[in-house]
Amino acid sequence: MIGLYLLTLIALIICPISVIFIISAVIANHTIFHRRYWGYLIIASSSAIIFYIGVRINSPVIPLVKTREIIATAFPFLGWEFKKIDTISYILSDFRTLGVALVLESVSLYLATLTPERMMINGERQREKSKMTLQRIDYIPKRSQVIFGVSGSGKSAYIGKSIEEILSKNPSSFVVIVDGKGSTEKYSLFYSCMIIAKKLDKRLVVINGTSNNELSDYVYDFLEGIESTDAMKDMVMSLLDNPSVQASAGSEHYKVITERYILKIIEFMQSHDIDVTLFNLLKLLDPADLNAVLDQMDFDSSEKKELKRFVDDSWSDVRANVEKLKMFMDGQGKKIFTGEGERINLRTAYSQRDIVLVLADEMSMPELASKLVQLVAYDLRNLIAGRLTGSIDMNDKIYSYWDEFSGYTSATKTLQSIYARARSADCICSLATQSCSDIIGLGDGWFERIIDTADRYVIFRQNSAEAAESAASIFGTELHVTDTARTSELQSTGEASNTVDRSFIVSPDMIRNLMVNRGFLLDKTKRPNHQLKYFKNKFVKEN
């Protein structure tokens, strides 16, 4: 490296303006080439050019006086005129001499610290910075996507802007959003959806699973429109599909009897043209109410006797589960499922292309919120199944967003089914949670399954080292050559080696240090050189 330093010093002495060229050459070497021999070549070329310029313009630097005299004498055909300079008066009068001396000292000290190892580190830093150039992104996912980001990092803002872009460009699309936080403050999903609905003249249907009774008057009638008795039974039983509920209601034996009991009542209601709503079903599950209805109906007495006998024989085993189902209809659950407002579910909302927002307040009503998310997951699965069988049109895309989905373990199995099969029904599913660790904690190979299925990954800040490394592993690694050189007293010994190694395309440290509303997007549907982008969130704004 000593040769590089000497060439730099010579060039600086020859001409003051060489400072600009020398610093530019050093920066170019570190950012582009990362090799010492390129440094020699750049500095040597710059020195020759600067020397010529300095002589031609009579640059008044002291050592140049003798140099000009020698060159003018040896090469008279060049036509260079030699002008003597009063050295003493020059030193005392020309401030540029002092400036050059200071620059020389500064650059020399800087170059003295540039060991091969430090040059390699600087090169790595420059490559990292090059990945942090803000770019525009397409907010509309073409296929399934996963979104990671701690609270306040920009997840909700990204989802809101994505919904706005979808409905602005494709107004006939159907969008379902499940907000696991149930938040209604500014920049929340509720706030963004209100603005979007107003802008695009669409109806926002809020299924209100919060303690705020002023948000919506819609009643979630999830059974209406379903033809399959098994699908209806599964949706009702999902309210009991919880270990704590099962423990309080009895063993697996009692659960099986309850399923059979509910199925029998649903079949009776369908065969006699009784609307299968949750309110009607829960009423007829009680033997007293069922017998009162049977006594008023005119049909074969033997069928009545058989149904009454079945109910009497089963009631003692299913009573605890039926009472548990009725408990979901008390309090806020009554307003959600059996209130007086307009009845709605995903199939009716899909037919009208409404925007459906499900607010599930896990903080104040965890059990009810968990069951609500489970029912919506079943509802969406039935909608997808209808599109696959042809009973529901597939003219337009369905977009579903599940924010904080990992908090609702009761819905994970249904979400797995949706996530795996949604693409076949032209339904694009987006799962959002705080960190990769949330999904890894679900077990059952959830993390691997999601990563294998998704084609688009959006990652905002991850605070923990483990979560940041898991996120970085999604972006993958790249090959690079490490130039390792041995030094002694900050000078190269001439011994060096090149090592082929792999490193993260986006380092975990970059992910941990992301600013609010800044993130990385990896889209595998794009060409390789356009897949990874660093972006800044846009917000849904009022007109």
Image: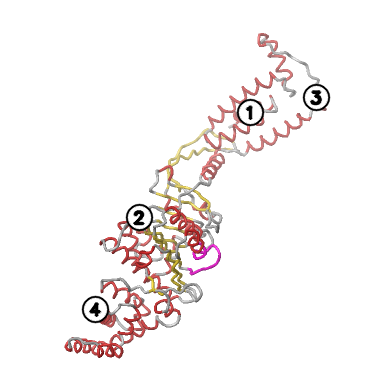
- Do tag 1 and tag 4 residues touch (Cβ < 8 Å)? no
Q: What is the CA distance from the residue labelled 4 to the residue labelled 3?
A: 109 Å
- Looking at the image, tell me whether mark 3 or mark 2 is earlier in sequence order: 3
- Element class at badge 2: helix
Q: Amino acid at mark 4?
A: Glu
Front-most of residues 297 and 453? 297
- Looking at the image, tell me whether mark 1 or mark 2 is earlier in sequence order: 1
Viewer-nearest of discs 3 and 2 = 2
The dot on residue 6 is: 1
The dot on residue 90 is: 3
Q: Is residue 6 left or right of residue 506?
A: right
* Residue stretch in magenta: 181-192
Viewer-nearest of discs 1 and 2 = 2
Q: What is the CA distance from the residue labelled 1 to the residue labelled 4?
A: 95 Å
In magenta stretch: residue 279: no
Q: Percent from the top left, x then y, of residue 450?
A: 37, 58
Determine which residue is flagged by label 2: 452
Report the coloring of the rendering.
secondary structure
Residue 195 showing in the rendered view? yes
Front-most of residues 250 and 309? 309
Whether residue 234 is situated above or below residue 299 in the rendered picture: above
Q: Amino acid at mark 3?
A: Tyr
- Do tag 4 and tag 2 residues touch (Cβ < 8 Å)? no
Front-most of residues 267 and 525? 267
Q: What is the CA distance from the residue labelled 4 to the residue labelled 2?
A: 41 Å
Determine which residue is flagged by label 4: 267
Please identify the dominant SS of the magenta region. loop
Q: Amino acid at mark 1?
A: Leu
In magenta stretch: residue 186: yes
- Looking at the image, tell me whether mark 3 or mark 1 is earlier in sequence order: 1
- Looking at the image, tell me whether mark 1 or mark 4 is earlier in sequence order: 1
